[in-house]
Amino acid sequence: MSKAVKFGLWTLAVAAFGYFVAGGLLYRLPIGLDWRAFPLGGAIERLFRGLGYQGDNAISAVFWLGLCLVGLWVAVIAARFGGKQSQPNALRRHVVTGGALLGATALASGAAALRAVFGLGTGTKGWGVVSEGIGSAKVETTHPSYPDAWKNARVQGFRTLGRTGWNVSDVVLGSGRIKDQKGTDIVRLALDRGVTYVDTAPDYSAAGSEDAVGKAIRGVRDRVFLATKFCTPYGHLGAGTPVADYERVVEDSLRRLGTDYVDLVHVHACDEVPRLMDPNMHEAFDRLRAAGKARFLGFSSHTPNLMAVGEQAIASGRFDVMMLAYHHGIWPQLGELIARARRDQNMGVIAMKTLKGAKHNGLAGFREQAPAYSQAALRWVLSNPDVSAAVISFFEFQHVDEYLQASGGTATPEDLGLLGEYDRQIVGTYCAPHCGACLTSCPEGLSIPDVLRHRMYFEDYGDEKEAMRLYAQLEKQADVCTGCSAPCLGSCPIGIDIPTRTRGAHEMLTLA
């Protein structure tokens, strides 16, 4: 075989290795996937964390990328030094080998970049475009003005959290986006202003939320109703998880929170009855309660199966609290479910997703021309006497003033007018939680609500990385919509153009 042919084959092999192996890993790395998405992820994670790695993200993908580079170098060196050598001069051999290493690295990296950064062959535009878009995005997270009348706002209303007997503030602190000292200071300020309920979870800010909350409640633990979830920093626990694992994750939360008990532990983001009623979870909770480590059991849900999950929770009599998506314009039957939960089981009800997708962040001129949408949305929720409290994410100091300004209030005619205008502006873009009317219309079995929810996280919440991570974990993605005859069109009761929105979501969320 001639040298030219050998060189050509070698070049093709290196480029293919870079594109398919390294490029595949590089393409998935920025999504922030759980370590279980990569081969031997658990063992790799334990090894590096045992060596002192403390990052928020899994290191498995980085490990395999590094191993790809080492493997490439070993292959090049073996090719240069293995077998009969044609260059008698050792220095020359080393120089040629060094050049081959650099050339192979550059070639493999270039091929990987074509796939990951520019999207060649992936059906996307690559990470380069999305990185530029994220860097230039200007997504508002608070009201653009900060009236003096809001400053020093305090909790003005308290309600009983169902059969727990706790008197909780009507606006409670969600800590999904806080961490570090700033997060601790925000929580402490909210507590000083009268907030008595804090909602956290191990997978909020990769356990950073629990750490920040734990520091904030030191010295005031006895006057805080503290809720966390059955999950790990990398995701939720599924049905069939061993009893010991359910217990362990709560004990891990207690350690991060610096307390010996939590008031409430939720089955997190529950969308299936088997997971809600998992015997192992219930046995674990009973053990935790007997040991004084958890006092009450709850569940959270914002999925198409919410009604079925909620009905089963009420019928079981096992749950003290439900936390569910509830906001203006929501399905009428949800109000009936809440009323029945209070009437039949005296369950506490926490309303979440109260800003109805937070799309006001992206509505041109909407916020500047109106009072705080957040306050109107919160007052609408609090107008329902069966709701024990409204939870909302605090992640800026202004939020303490802005959100607590709504405490003790009910929706005014001005609020209803503002919310009505909001609904008119988001027609055709907002996928209401726990509807699911479109699911039977998709021949591919695509979870349309999940696709559109992850798009909402990207577009409206400004949480691009998390949106792409969650989208990457879906069993099926919206590339199946390409070329489809779109029987889903017209199935949405509120008029969303499903195929257009899902195809757009796929391009947006797979730019990774």
Image (spheres, grey):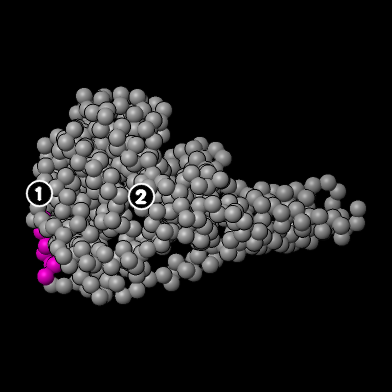
Circle on res. 433: 2
In the image shown, does 65 or 340 lie closer to the viewer?
Answer: 340
Q: Residue, x 36% and y 46% (percent of image)? A: 434
Q: Which amino acid, by three-letter code, is at mark 1? A: Phe
Describe the element under mark 2 as helix, strand or loop: loop
Circle on res. 158: 1
User: How far across and down, in percent of the image, does residue 322 sit?
Assistant: 25, 40
User: Label 2: how many residues lie within 10 Å, few (<14), some (14-19) or many (20+)?
Assistant: many
In the image shown, does 108 or 126 lie closer to the viewer?
Answer: 126
Q: Kindly tell me whether residue 248 is visible in this rendering.
A: no
User: How far across and down, in percent of the image, does residue 116 sit?
Assistant: 59, 59
Say left or right for 463 vs 343: right
User: How far across and down, in percent of the image, does residue 70 sit?
Assistant: 64, 50
| Label 2 or label 1, whichever comes before in sequence order | 1
Label 2 vs label 1, nearer the camera: 2
Q: Look at the image and give the residue range highlighted in magenta.
A: 149-155
Q: Residue 260 is drawn in which quadrant?
A: top left
Q: Which amino acid, by three-letter code, is at mark 2? A: Pro
Q: Main secondary structure of the magenta part?
A: loop
Circle on res. 406: none
Q: Residue, x 14% and y 47% (percent of image)? A: 385
Q: Kindly tell me whether residue 306 is visible in this rendering.
A: yes
In the image shown, does 86 or 122 lie closer to the viewer?
Answer: 122
Q: Residue 342 is drawn in which quadrant?
A: top left
Q: Residue, x 15% and y 41% (percent of image)? A: 161
Q: Is residue 448 above or below residue 114?
A: above
Q: Residue 253 is drawn in which quadrant?
A: top left
